[in-house]
Image (cartoon, rainbow, N blue to C red):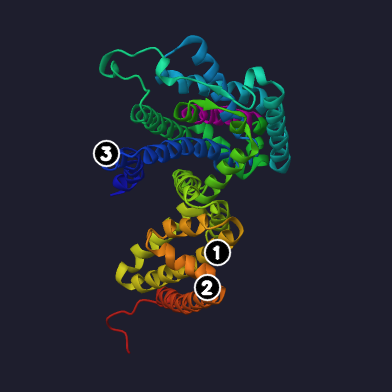
Amino acid sequence: MRRRRSLAPWLALVAFLAVPPFVWPHSWLLAYLAQSATMIVFALSYNLLLGETGLLSFGHAAYAGLGALIAAHVFNASGMPLVLLPLVGGLGGALCGVLLGFIATRRAGTAFAMITLGLGELVVAAAWALPDWFGGEAGVAIDRASGARLTGPLAGWSFGPAREAYALIAVWCVVASVAMFALSRTPFMRLANAVRDNPARAAAIGCYPPRVRYGVVVLSAFFAGVAGTLGLINMELVSTESVGMMRSGAVLIATVTGGTAAFFGPVAGAVVLTFFSVIVASVTRAWLFYLGLFFVAVVMAAPDGLAGFGTRHAARIAAHGWRRCRAAYLWSAAAALLGLAAIVLAVQWAYAAQFGADEGAALGALFGASAAVPLLSTLAASPPRLALLLGALAILAGLTMRRAIRAHSSLAAHATCPARLPGDAR
């Protein structure tokens, strides 16, 4: 049973990457999965810093972008096999980690975060100041089909088609995830955990904390370079945005949303972040608002992230049984859906009033019903009706939330009540 539980997340990851392309082989789905795989590796590499070593970095995108840039130049100059390109990007990221990490790891805590912020800004400035190397506004492009052809089972693969490129990205995502999982179980990472929890005590037993942090930064930069190169293979382009602060902020949000305490927490956060940035962004320009709202809700309701939230409630269901917990979770789900509907209606109405009717159509796409667009347009044109609907949804959400709170309180009271023995007096 314990072995099955440990294998379940890996099976879920492989199923997420492998099954959808066969069930629904659309180009947008391949693009979403490729970006998800890239962000999974990127978030796991960042968690080596934040979760394993307690280092908050604001410049992690520099390693991914510089690693991808080095890989692009090497590929264009040598025409090497595309299969090996992520390894080149990883080595390029590690080299940048050796240089930048030597400066950043002299300090820990807030000082480390500020140093990485400054280093990240320096890299961004260098990207604009050195257009011959960074490519300027156009970036550095590659033709992934121009690499050396392979022999054996992959002899006919050019990696030009999106399906072949995605297969390579998915395989590298799994390989990199397995490598980071194995790394997290090594004695060196246990030492990094000790430096995270109590650096003074770790130093007292003969450990030199800056050296441990330095090693973790280099390893994290290696896998960040792999992630950046996977993005290069997907887009066939690396630009100055790849080293920007927006990307560093995105990986921080993904890691914290998923949870830093569990290995697969950043995986969940990466999938959610890519869902907002690809799926939601394709139907509404308010996707950043929804992402920020979701991030705030997760931090407030589950400081340990989605992984910790899921673990706690799975243990609760296992302890009390689904029948006893069913009412509480169904009422909670109903309250969440009603509240979400009210928020989406209000936000999309505001965006439609500001940017035009396209956001009204986007709202219909969000609800998955094109027939709802005329109704939504009517509501948008009539603020009193919209206000009435929003008020009704808010009242229903409040009443449903009260029922959910009562159900959860009843469940908690049952948990604290001592078990009654058969011979006890009533």
Element type at mark 3: helix
Amino acid marked by disc 1: Trp
Q: Main secondary structure of the magenta part?
A: helix
Tell me how far mark 2 sits from mark 1, CA to CA: 9 Å
- Between discs 2 and 1, the one toward the N terminus: 1
Q: Does residue 311 sit above or below 72 in this rendering?
A: below
Q: Residues within 10 Å of mark 3 (few under 14, many from 20)?
A: few
Percent coordinates x, y for residue 295 in the rendering: 56, 55
Viewer-nearest residue: 96 or 361:
361
Amino acid marked by disc 3: Phe
Amino acid marked by disc 2: Leu
Quadrant of residue 80 in the image?
Answer: top left
Percent coordinates x, y for residue 63 in the rendering: 59, 29
Q: Residues within 10 Å of mark 1 (few under 14, many from 20)?
A: many
Element type at mark 2: helix
Q: Where is mark 2, residue-wise?
A: 386
Residue drawn at point x = 29 percent, y = 19 percent: 154
Instruction: Look at discs 3 and 2 and give the one toward the viewer.
Output: 2
Viewer-nearest residue: 169 or 355:
355
Q: Magenta stretch: residue 206 in it?
A: no
Quadrant of residue 420 in the image?
Answer: bottom left
Q: Are marks 2 and 1 in contact (CB under 8 Å)?
A: yes
- Between discs 1 and 3, the one toward the N terminus: 3
Residue drawn at point x = 55 percent, y = 51 percent: 285
Q: Which residues are magenta?
A: 211-230
